[in-house]
Amino acid sequence: MKEQVKADARAEFGAARIARTEALVVAAARELFLEHGYAATALTQVARRAGVAPRTVYVRFGTKAALFRRVVDEALVGDAEPIDVAHRPRAQDAMTAETLTERLNALADVTVGIADRAGALLEVAAQAEGAEPEIAEAAQSGRRETARLCKEFWSRAAEDGLLASTVDVGQLATTMDALLCADTMVHLRRVHGWSAAEYGPWLRNALHALVAADRLR
């Protein structure tokens, strides 16, 4: 029994040490990707900034593309927990709140949070897509997921009686997809210099304008 307790304690300590090391590497990588871009950042630089051996970075993450994806994934949700955006509480509010206004506000909160935490990284990702197939595939997967969530949002709203029967759910989903997608965030940053603080009010107004008051119940 004592041996099992000791083994469990060692395993817990080892897991905690790995988590701390990965957190240091991810934080260092985020800083360097934002400072120098994707192409000019090397794993050896990340190791140096994190204060770990280069081999540690290779063992824990394998490739620069894999490390970058980890950095982006954590920025999207705000932590290292293995729970994607769609299953976070505020995202669930967007699908289940009692009124359409509450759902739209929750969805805006989720999207603006992503813009605040990951907007600059998404711009780095856009630059890296042409050179890294793994990043390009991840970006395309993200686009497909955004489109799916937009379709689910309006389908649920219709099923829950929050839309008039004449509303074109497909058109609403497509328009919302264009508003929420990462490419739009990147465009607004590059062309208009918008931060999340500027993106937020625009997005909320645009989402609520998608459906006219006389078409809602």
Image: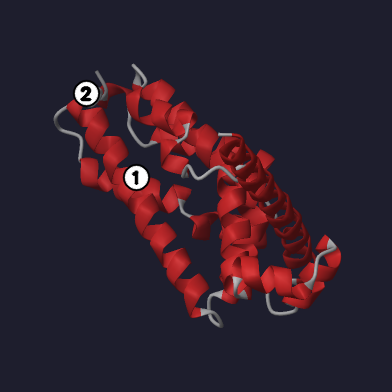
In the rendering, at what x and y percent does residue 164 appear?
19, 26
Q: What element does badge 1 sit on?
A: helix
Name the residue carrying label 2: 160
In the rendering, at what x and y percent does residue 83 appear?
48, 42
In the rendering, at what x and y percent does residue 182 appear?
51, 56
Mark 1 vs mark 2: which is more N-terminal? 1
Q: Residue at x 51, y 60 (%)?
A: 183
Q: What element does badge 2 sit on?
A: loop
In the rendering, at what x and y percent does residue 22 appear?
68, 56
- Image check: 165 left or right of 87? left
Residue 63 visible in rendering: yes
User: Which amino acid, mark 2?
Assistant: Asp
Name the residue carrying label 1: 149
Q: Residue at x 63, y 48 (%)?
A: 15
Q: Quadrant of the N terminus?
A: top right
- Image check: 114 left or right of 143? right
- Image check: 113 left or right of 82? right
Work out how far the residue at label 1 is from the one at label 2, CA to CA, in angstroms: 16 Å
Q: Residue at x 45, y 48 (%)?
A: 179
Residue 54 image-quadrant placement: bottom right
